[in-house]
Image (cartoon, rainbow, N blue to C red):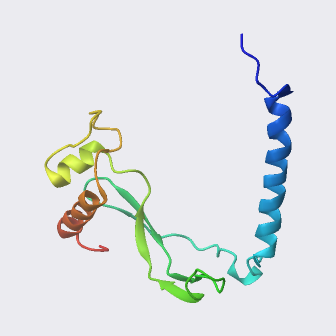
Amino acid sequence: MTENRVDGGSLVGILLPVVAVLALAGGIAFFASGAREVPAHSAPAEVPLAQLTNSLGMQFVQIPAGRFLMGSDAEGYGPEHEVQVPAFYLGVHEVTQAQWQAVMGYNPSAFPDPSRPVEQVSWLDVQAFLEELNRREGTNR
């Protein structure tokens, strides 16, 4: 059995102070960076979400339009600016292999099972899926 010792001291005895110092330094750097609390007025609103089910049984909820601050005035980041995001629909569940097959005509998954989420798809594959789904179902139906 090997012991975790370095130069006569235990490895834990050496690493523990190093980890503690790094954690403390990270906390100091975080607070020194000017991190600020989220203002109370930006608390999420209690808005009932519009729901939609398409012809494939895919369920969606509408995410309301909103805005947020992006960027930072700190050096090395882009200037802080407001970004507005329009309302959009978000799938409640992952796209299943059966749904992908129905829209795209093939199943790329390495672990075939129609009820499981599709995998082995790239960002470009997903963009093609969304384009075809919108063509069939109508954009923001």
Which quadrant is home to the N terminus?
A: top right
Which quadrant is home to the C terminus?
A: bottom left
Task: State the image coordinates of residue 80 (x, y, percent, origin top left).
Answer: 60, 87
Image quarter for residue 115?
top left
User: Which of 20 and 129 lies nearest the eye of the viewer?
Assistant: 20
User: Which of 75 and 42 lies nearest the eye of the viewer?
Assistant: 75
Instruction: Looking at this view, name the residue that lies furthest to the front.
Output: 7
Please, is residue 122 above or below residue 3 in the view? below
Task: State the image coordinates of residue 137 (x, y, percent, origin top left).
Answer: 22, 66
Q: Residue at x 80, y 54 (%)?
A: 23
Task: State the image coordinates of residue 113 (x, y, percent, origin top left).
Answer: 29, 33
User: In the visual, does 126 lie left or right of 77?
Assistant: left
User: In the visual, does 116 lie left or right of 50?
Assistant: left
Q: Residue at x 83, y 27 (%)?
A: 10
Q: Residue at x 44, y 82 (%)?
A: 86
Task: State the image coordinates of residue 29 (x, y, percent, origin top left).
Answer: 78, 68
Image quarter for residue 76?
bottom right
Please, is residue 73 above or below residue 138 in the view? below
Image quarter for residue 61?
bottom left
Instruction: Looking at this view, name the residue that lies furthest to the top.
Output: 1
